Every structure is written in C-alpha cells, then in structure tokens.
Image (tube, coloured by chain):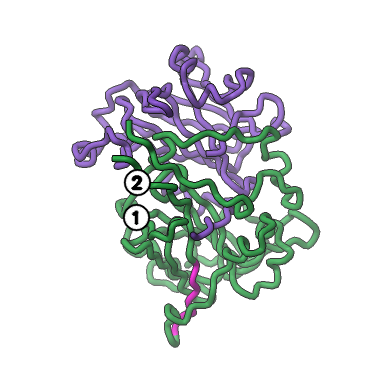
Amino acid sequence: MSQLAQYRRPFWDTQPGYRFDPYGSTQLRSPNEPLIIVPQTLSEITGPAFGGAYVKQGDNDLTCIANADAIGERIIVSGRVLDENGRPVPDALIEIWQANAAGRYLHKRDQHDAPLDPNFSGEGRTVTDADGRYQFKTIKPGAYPWGNHYNGWRPQHIHFSLFGRAYATRLVTQMYFPGDPLLEFDPIFQCVPDVKARNRLIATLDWETTVPEYALGYRFDIVLRGRNATPME
Amino acid sequence: MLYPTTSQTVGPYLHIGLSGLNCADLTTGRSDLGAPAIVIEGRVTDGQGNPVPDGMIEIWQADARGVYQHPDDPSYSATDAARSSFTGFGRVPTEPDGTFRFTTIKPGRVAGPGGTLQAPHLVVSLFMRGLLKHLSTRMYFPDEAQANEQDWILHRVPAARRATLVAQQSDSGVLRWNVALQGAGETVFFDI
C-alpha cells in the first residue's frame, strides 16, 4: 500500500477545546477523558463526495421564496475555500443556515418573541467552483437573546457546514459581521484564546461584490486542513 | 501557510440547514450492495445520562468489498465512479429521546497503518449544541472478534474502554451502539 498523505493537525490555538465553562452547554456534553490521538487511515483521508448533484440552481439565494422577497437587508456573502497550503478546494459542499432579519429562526425550538418571515427559510447550499469560490445571496441576520447567561445575546452570524475532500477536513463554523459590539461578550466567538484566529471568523465588507443600488457584499474565506505531503505513487 | 478556520458549534437550530442531506438508509435504491442490510440503533446521552435530543450523527464507511467511493482509495476505480453504487455516507438527527437509527451494510476490511488490515468499522462524527468542535469516533462490529483484536486503531485504545466502540447484537437482530458523551462508560473519541 502506498503511503497516505496525512492532513496536518490544526495549529494548536486555532481550534476550541470541548469544555468551555462560559458556554454552559459544553459542561455536560464534553468528554472528561482526553481524546486518543491516532494517525489518519484510509477511512479518514476519504470522505463523501457530493459534487453538484445535491445542489439545485437557486439554492444559494435565500432572499426569496416563490418570487416573494424576504424582509431585511439584502447582502451577498462570498469567498474562497482554501486548504492550509493555499490551494483552492473545489467541489466542496457548503450548507448554511441563519436567523431572519428579526433574529428569529424558522425552527420549532426557537421561542424568541420576534416575527417569522413567510418569505425566508434561512437555509442555503452551494458547491465551490474549480477555484474554490462560492457565493450566497441572503438577508443580514438579526441578533437574538439566548439563555446562556443573564442578558445574553448572540452576535449576528451565519452557520456554515463544509465537506472538503476528506472526513478529516469536515468543518462547521460561524461567520460574523465586522463592527458587531456583541462579539466581545459572546462565549462562542470567544472560545479560542488566539484573537487572530477568532477575528478570521469575521467577514469583511467587500466592494468588489457589492452591487450598487442593490446589496452590500461581505467576504468570508474559509481554510480547511491541508496535507503534509503528496502521496507516494 | 494559512491557518485553519476555527470550528464553531452547530447550535440548536442545525436542522434548518442540514436536514436536506439526511440519509438514514444507505441501502435505498441500491441493488448491488454485496451484503445484507443491517440496522444500527443507539442513543446519545450527556454527562448526567440525559438524552441528547438536538444532535446530529454522520457516518462514513466502505462498501462490502472494503472500498471507499473516493478517488484517494487506491482500490477505487473508474468503474466504481461510473456506476451509481453505495455512497457510504449517512446523516441523521437524534430524536427527542436521544435515539438514532441507520440502515446500512457491514463494510469490508480496509487498509490500515503499517500494511495491516483494519477490522470492519464506521467512522462517526457527532455534532450538537455544546460541542464547539465535532467529535470523532468509530463503531466496530461484535461478530468480528478476531479482526477487532488485530485492529491497529483499537489497539491504541486502553483495553478497558474498547467495548465502547463495539456495537452489541440484540435479540431482534439490530445492532445496538450507544454514545455516552461524558462520565460513566464514556465513549472513546479520537483526535484525528
């Protein structure tokens, strides 16, 4: 069997741990035992390949349902998916979900007293192109309260789920907005000590994708684990 | 070099964006599976033994021959790509009582480290509110005692904890495999 090129382990302070007391839900859902470090085998360096088959045209546009416009500030969110070596990750499936402009999710467990929007479901998906590029058109989500601590409010954010090339490159993250005053009080955003790592979760205003008279653009690049070396043939 | 993006929790409303890809039955519409269908059932519980009603489980596995539907598997060929065969991917949310259920096949053995063969297994990812980063584990099969004994990865696990990774055969023929996130009988999780 040829030698398998392993995916690099993330730089130590770029990723959160499991137990993080300021985020209360981690307290009973984090393992007590340390994780067991194992090399990646064929099982971890392969992974589901969805390609475009799962994505329909229009799945990356969250701003209307049956031609009726959602309420709120229309925005364009785009960027590239790269690996740690700076190479684009093509054919990466991206699934997103978010609250509406009023800060309410279309979900039975969300009891926040804010209006639902019949023209906004808050889900989207797309696949990156050959250069790793993706784009969504959506509505800027609202902030909303949560019960983690007294007067706790989540900053505006969009959830991202990604499949790269391998099971080992699976990533779920959240994208935030520049200048949000709630970020410094949010234990989920604050979960890693490295301020540069968490600031990379904040999108930047992007004039290149901003459409005059129509929608502001935000850029959010995502980096998945990269390989240490090329495999032996 | 770039730094990998920081992981964040899926939160409690993951179903909005992730249900579209749900797949509880990996055998649906497949006729060339090469193995009988099996059912895997289990329950996810937290550090107080309470069910996790708002989680999601993903599985990834080889086909009955021990081949992954992926170009980085040296055994995978263009013939595999051409035919619409077993994908090897499943995803389900946990139910209000913390349970989950997959219908699939037992995978064949795949190559492991150092020229070994791994015992048949699924790789498993768990996502939920309260996990800032998803958890990775594995499920092995109870009728593969000898292969499990020789499995390179299982050997890295302290013997007393290995049983948490092996499903149990129930009288009904269903494989039972529970996941304990924390505390008594805590499931082994891997840093891959």
> As drawn, is B137 to the left or to the right of B30?
right
Label 2 sits on residue: A49
Mark 1 falls on what kind of element?
loop
Q: Is residue A218 magenta?
A: yes
Rendered shade, chain A: green
The chain letter corresponding to purple is B
Mark count: 2
N-terminal label among 2 and 1: 2
Residue in view at x 32 percent, y 40 percent: A232
Disc 1 residue crowd, few under 14, some 14–19, many 20+, Cα 10 Å: many
Q: What element carries label 2?
A: loop
Query: Mark 2 is on which residue type?
Result: Ala
Q: Name the residue nearer the viewer: B121 or A113.
A: B121
- How far apart, in angstroms, are the residues tagged by discs 2 and 1? 8 Å
Using the image, determine if residue A23 lies above or below residue A208: above
Query: What is the quadrant of the N terminus of chain A in the image?
Result: top left
Residue in front for this viewpoint, A213 or A187: A187
Locate residue B51: give its quadrant. Answer: top right
Name the residue carrying label 1: A91
